Image (spheres, rainbow, N blue to C red):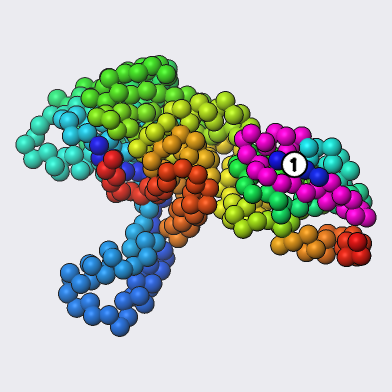
């Protein structure tokens, strides 16, 4: 099972501005001083192997979109944030034989940052493509139609050439979709959100974003630990620090790295991937959170290690 | 988790010990509660001696947040002192060092919050 991250930013897409880019260039040039980098291969090896992550990478700025690839013919996607645009373009570029495809899209919820990429998802504009959009909200179809309506967008939903279907799911019920066993779970978020657990060939990945956890409720924690139980990968909403999440940003519907580690440790999960990054966080700040989370796992570990990852646009994880 | 109290002048020293986690956080919160009402402007200063605390989870930190919030609204002073290295790191990673004043030791906390109690503490 291969997980590809096309959008990892929370709430609102962001881009790396000129000042931040130049700061990276300055750091890279200083790090390169005195080295012999007179060929492209040497320069590339230096950039990919020698520079700090925050200098050589950017976490990126697209909002939530994650692809789950089990090697079947159909595409499986979680959320249609702005990352869906690049995913669609990538599919188009790879589709040299002009084949039609089926897409299975699982929606965590209907907030704008999780559906805003759909009008720019080029497979929706190709006749013969089939797009099945799954979710637990009764307003699933309405939300997609609304953002295609005037005055928000120039192309009405009914003019999209692909065959688009909406499929209502019931939380807690197991479905077999595109070769995956899929179960949804209700999460605390304004207007509700739903996490998904996907299983295939003995591997499992949980997509749990836009989810606040009420720490005082042990039953809630145990319920999520059960949902995450033994997962090979948990993609987790770690938007805020714990202090913010339970004080000034309480009831804003998001969680923290600390709670992610605790729940994954309770669940015996193998990997935790920090996701839905706060838009104001720059690359250095996110690397700091990632480093601190690895340290937290280390000092609180009582059983098998939990690998800590931080999602960035372009990250691929094989489980 | 245990909480023992000791009064030094206007300062109430509350010494916690053990693990403050899902199993014990509610007990910690309940044990703290009776001491908070007098922690107000012109009233008691509360110093939580964490030298015996081995671990604190998110739910334990939430109990501290609630206590700090109540004390702040009453115009009082509350602080945590003598965190073990692991607990100190948890405070830093969770950004709780920004929520409640943290001091290296009890003496440092008293020096900042109640010099008169520090004198009494030194004499004891």
Q: Is residue A225 left or right of residue A92?
A: right
Residue at 50% over, 44% down: A302
Quarter holding residue B21: top right
Viewer can see residue A182: yes
Q: Chain of mark 1?
A: B
Say which residue label 1 marks.
B2
Residue B100's spot in the image, x, y percent? 71, 52
For the record, the magenta segment spans B5-30
Q: Position of residue A87 (x, y in %)?
A: 25, 41
Residue A51 at x, y percent in the picture: 34, 67
- Asked if residue A264 is positioned above or below residue A147 in the image, the reply reads below
* Membership of B21 in magenta stretch: yes
Q: Residue at x 33, y 24 (%)?
A: A182
Front residue of B25/A149: it is B25
Residue A177 lies in the magenta-colored region: no
The quadrant in which the C terminus of chain B is found is bottom right
Task: Give the residue displayed 38% in from the left and 73% down from the top.
Answer: A26
Where is the N terminus of chain B found, in terms of image quarters?
Answer: top right
């Amino acid at each position: 099972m291969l997980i590809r991250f096309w959008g990892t930013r929370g709430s609102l897409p962001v881009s790396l501005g000129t000042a931040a880019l130049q700061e990276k260039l300055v750091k890279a040039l200083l790090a390169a001083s005195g080295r012999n980098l007179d060929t492209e291969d040497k320069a590339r090896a230096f950039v990919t192997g020698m520079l700090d992550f925050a200098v050589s990478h950017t976490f990126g700025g697209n909002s939530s979109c994650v692809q789950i690839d089990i090697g079947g013919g159909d595409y499986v996607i979680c959320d249609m944030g702005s990352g869906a645009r690049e995913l669609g373009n990538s599919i188009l570029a790879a589709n040299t034989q002009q084949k039609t495809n089926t897409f299975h899209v699982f929606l965590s919820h209907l907030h704008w940052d999780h559906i805003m990429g759909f009008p720019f998802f080029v497979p929706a504009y190709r006749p013969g493509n089939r797009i099945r959009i799954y979710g637990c909200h009764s307003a699933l179809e309405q939300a997609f139609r609304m953002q295609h309506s005037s005055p928000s967008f120039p192309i009405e939903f009914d003019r999209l050439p692909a065959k688009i279907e909406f499929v209502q799911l019931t939380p807690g019920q197991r479905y077999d979709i595109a070769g995956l066993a899929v179960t949804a779970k209700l999460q605390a978020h304004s207007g509700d959100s739903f996490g998904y657990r996907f299983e295939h060939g003995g591997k499992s990945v949980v997509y749990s974003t836009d989810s606040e956890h009420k720490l005082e409720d042990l039953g809630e924690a145990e319920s999520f630990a059960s949902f995450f139980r033994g997962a090979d990968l948990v993609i987790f909403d770690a938007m805020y620090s714990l202090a913010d999440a339970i004080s000034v940003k309480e009831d804003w519907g998001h969680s923290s790295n600390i709670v992610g580690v605790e729940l994954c440790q309770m669940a015996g999960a193998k990997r935790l991937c920090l996701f839905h990054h706060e838009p104001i966080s720059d690359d250095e700040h996110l690397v700091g959170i990632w480093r601190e989370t690895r340290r937290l796992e280390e000092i609180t570990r009582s059983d098998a290690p939990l690998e800590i990852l931080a999602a960035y646009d372009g990250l691929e994880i094989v489980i | 988790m245990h909480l023992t109290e000791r009064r030094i002048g206007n300062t109430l020293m509350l010494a916690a010990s053990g693990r403050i986690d899902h199993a014990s956080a509610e007990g910690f919160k309940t044990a703290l509660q009776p001491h908070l009402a007098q922690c107000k402007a012109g009233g008691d200063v509360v110093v939580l001696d964490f030298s015996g605390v081995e671990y604190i989870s998110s739910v334990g930190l939430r109990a501290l947040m609630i206590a700090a919030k109540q004390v702040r609204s009453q115009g009082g002073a509350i602080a945590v002192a003598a965190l073990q290295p692991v607990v100190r790191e948890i405070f830093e990673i969770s950004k709780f060092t920004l929520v409640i004043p943290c001091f290296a030791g009890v003496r440092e906390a008293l020096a900042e919050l109640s010099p008169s109690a520090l004198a009494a503490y030194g004499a004891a």
